[in-house]
Image: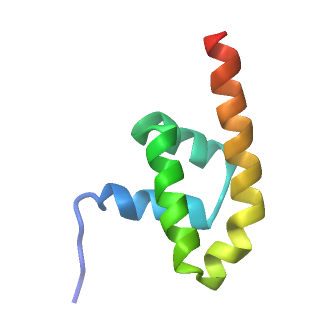
């Protein structure tokens, strides 16, 4: 049996990006969904307390901080 999904939901895409954090992927997610929405989804993942979220946390925090600093610099 073949499963097909035309396009995963926004939540699925954001969670996948957050749990396998890469700068360009999270930057794309911020541009697509907004930094605030991505941060909110990250907060939900952290509250769930999964091992995957715990492992990703240091990298996600670092990357999101750099992205948000870059956005702030661009607006200045």
Closer-to-camera residue (44/30): 44
How many numbered discs? Answer: 0
Closer-to-camera residue (33/5): 33
Residue 37 position in % (x across, y down): 44, 46
Judge whether 35 appears above or below 22 on screen. above
Judge whether 52 appears above or below 70 on screen. below
| Direction front: furthest residue | 47
Q: Is residue 22 left or right of residue 35?
A: right
Residue at the image point whose x is 29% and y is 60% from the top: 9
Closer-to-camera residue (15/4): 15
Q: Is residue 28 left or right of residue 54?
A: left
Residue at the image point whose x is 63% and y is 78% from the top: 52
Q: Is residue 9 left or right of residue 16?
A: left
Which quadrant of the rendered structure holds the C terminus? top right
Residue 70 position in % (x across, y down): 70, 26
Judge whether 34 appears above or below 51 on screen. above
Residue 2 position in % (x across, y down): 24, 82
Display colour scheme: rainbow
| Direction top: furthest residue | 76
Residue at the image point whose x is 72% and y is 47% from the top: 63
Residue 40 position in % (x across, y down): 48, 54
Quadrant in which residue 18 is drawn: bottom right
Residue at the image point whose x is 54% and y is 73% from the top: 47
Which quadrant of the rendered structure holds the N terminus? bottom left
């Amino acid at each position: 049996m073949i499963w097909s999904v035309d396009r995963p939901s926004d939540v699925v895409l954001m969670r996948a990006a957050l749990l396998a954090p890469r700068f360009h992927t999270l930057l794309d997610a911020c541009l697509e969904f907004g930094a605030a929405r991505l941060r909110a989804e990250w907060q939900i993942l952290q509250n769930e307390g999964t091992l995957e979220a715990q492992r990703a946390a240091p990298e996600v925090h670092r990357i999101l901080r750099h992205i948000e600093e870059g956005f702030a610099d661009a607006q200045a």
